[in-house]
Amino acid sequence: MLRLHEHVAKQLTVMVIVLICIFGTASYFFCKQMEFDKYENVLKTTLNIIKTSIIYKSDFDAYVKEVGESSGLRITLIGDDGVVLADSAADIEVMENHNNRLEIMQARSHEYGMAVRYSHTLKEDFLNAASRVKIGETFYFVRVTTPLNLVMKSFYLIWTSIVAIFALVLLIGFFWINRFSKNIRNEVLKLNSACTALADKDYKKEFHFGFAREFAELGIYLKKLAKRLEKSAKHKRKYTAKIRLLSRQKSDIISAISHEFKNPIASVIGYAQTLNEDENIDAEIRKKFLKKIEKNSQKISDMIDRLSLAVKLENGDLPFQMSEFDFDALTKDIAASFSIAEPSREIIYEGERTLVKADAQMMEIVVSNLISNALKYSENAVRVKLKNGVFSVKDSGIGIAEEETDKITDKFYRVEGRSWDNSLGLGLTFVSYILKMHGIELKIQSKLNEGSEFSFNLPGVLE
C-alpha cells in the first residue's frame, strides 16, 4: 500500500503525463495548421502581387524567372487550356498538361485553389496555390508553389521550440511535485510522531504544522486531544491513588484491629478458660480474674466505639451541635476524671474562665485525647494550660522525631517503635478532624526525648 505523499506524487505524475500527451498532440496539429495557414497566406499574397503586375509584362518567361529568383518560390504560368506557358524552376517542354491539377480546378470556381501534391517534374512534395487572371481578353492561371519540406521544417522548428519550453515547464513541475510530495510526507511524519507521542502518553511534546490549513487544523485538534488526555490521565492517576489509599487504609484498619484486639481478647479467653476448667478456684482469685475479664472487655468496647466514631467523622454522619459553654469548666472536669482514673499520675492544670461557642461533645473528645496521649507518652507530670484563648497540653516524654511530626495525625499512625493499649492510632486523627471542622488547626511542637506540646486557638471565644 502506497503512502499518502506517494499517492499524491503518482496522481500528479499521471496527470502530467496525460497533459503531455494531450498538449503534444494538440500543439502538433495546431502548429502544423498554423504554419500551413501562414505559408498559404504568403502564397496568396504573392499571387496577388503577380496578378497585379503580370498584365503589364510581355515576356512571361523572363518575368516568371525573375519573380521566382527574388521570392524563392516556384512560379508557373498556365494557359486556360492547362498548357504550361512558363515556369521558374522547370523545363515547360517536359511538363504535362495541368488542366486536371487540383489547385487549377479549384481556381476555376474559387478565387484561390490550394493543394499539396507531389511533383513528378521536381521529384518532391509542394504546397501549391493557384489563381485565375485575365490578361487582355485571355484567361490564364498563375500558380505559386513552395517545397513542402520547407513548410514542415519551419513547422518542426516552431513545434520543437514549444515542446522544449513545455519540457522545461514540466521539469519545473516535477520539481514542484517532488517538493509538494516531500512537504506532505513531512507533515504526515509529524502527525505520526504526534500520534506516537500521545500513544506513549507524552502529552508535553511540541509539534507544529504549517504546510496547509488542514494540517494546521489537525495540529490544533491534536493539541486539544493531548490536553484532554493529559487531564484524563491526571484524573485517572488521582483516582488510582485514591483507590490505592482506600485499599491501604482498609488494610491498615484490618491490621490495627487485629493487633489491638488480639491482647485483650486473648486475656478474656485465658481468664475465662481458667475459671471454666477449675471449679474449686479461690474466691479472691476468681474475683480478680473476673475484673480482668471486665477490664479487657471494656477495652474492646472502647476500641469499637473509637472505630465507629472515626467512621462517622470521616463520612460526616456526626453533625456538630454548636452551643455556648465555659471551656475552663470542661477542661477541669476532664482533668479530674483522668486524675481519678490514674491516681499515680500528676496532671497540673492552669486555666481561666473562657466562654466559647463550639460543639461541647466534640471539644470534650479533643481535650480527652490530648491529655490521654500525653499520659501515654510521658511518665512525668502533664501540664494543661488555658490562657488568652489558647489551649495547650505539654509533656516531657519521648517526643516526636521531626520527620514524623506531619504524620502523627494520620489514621492508624503511631510513633515508630511505640505502642499502647486501646489506641488504634486514632486519637490525634479525631483531634485534627474536629478542630478543622471548627476552622482551627492543631499546632505541634516536639523534640525527640524531650517532650511534646499540642496547642490550638479556641474557636468562637466570647469572653
Image (tube, rainbow, N blue to C red):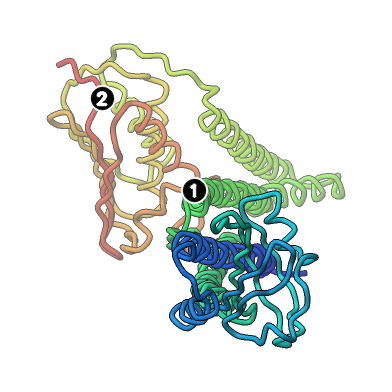
Query: Residue farthest to the top?
Result: 323
Q: Residue at x 63, y 63 (%)?
A: 141
Task: Kindly identify which residue carries mark 2.
Answer: 459
Left or right, residue 280 beside residue 321: right
- Residue 2, placed above or below residue 348: below
Name the residue that disc number 1 marks. Answer: 217
The location of residue 241, given as percent across then percent down, is 56, 52
The reply, left or right, for residue 228 in relation to residue 127 is left
302 or 57, nearer to the observer:
57
Structural crowding at the residue carrying mark 1, measured as other residues with C-alpha within 10 Å and reported as few (<14), some (14–19) or many (≥20): few
Vertical side of 391 occupied by 204: above or below: below
| Distance from the alpha carbon under mark 2 to that under mark 1 | 57 Å
Q: Is residue 420 visible?
A: no
Left/right placement of residue 338 relative to residue 284 reads: left
**Residue 6 percent location from the top left of the image:** 66, 70
Q: Secondary structure at mark 2?
A: loop
Q: Position of residue 336 (x, y in %)?
A: 34, 30
Q: Nearer the viewer, residue 71 or 308?
A: 71
Amino acid of disc 1 = Glu
SS type, badge 1? helix
Q: Quadrant of residue 123?
A: bottom right
Quadrant containing the C terminus is top left
Residue 228 against residue 25 in the figure, above or below: above
Which comes sooner in the sequence, label 2 or label 1? 1
Q: Residue at x 57, y 74 (%)?
A: 159
For the point 61% across and 51% down, which residue is it?
A: 111
Estimate the x, y position of residue 279 in percent, counting from the top left. Answer: 86, 44
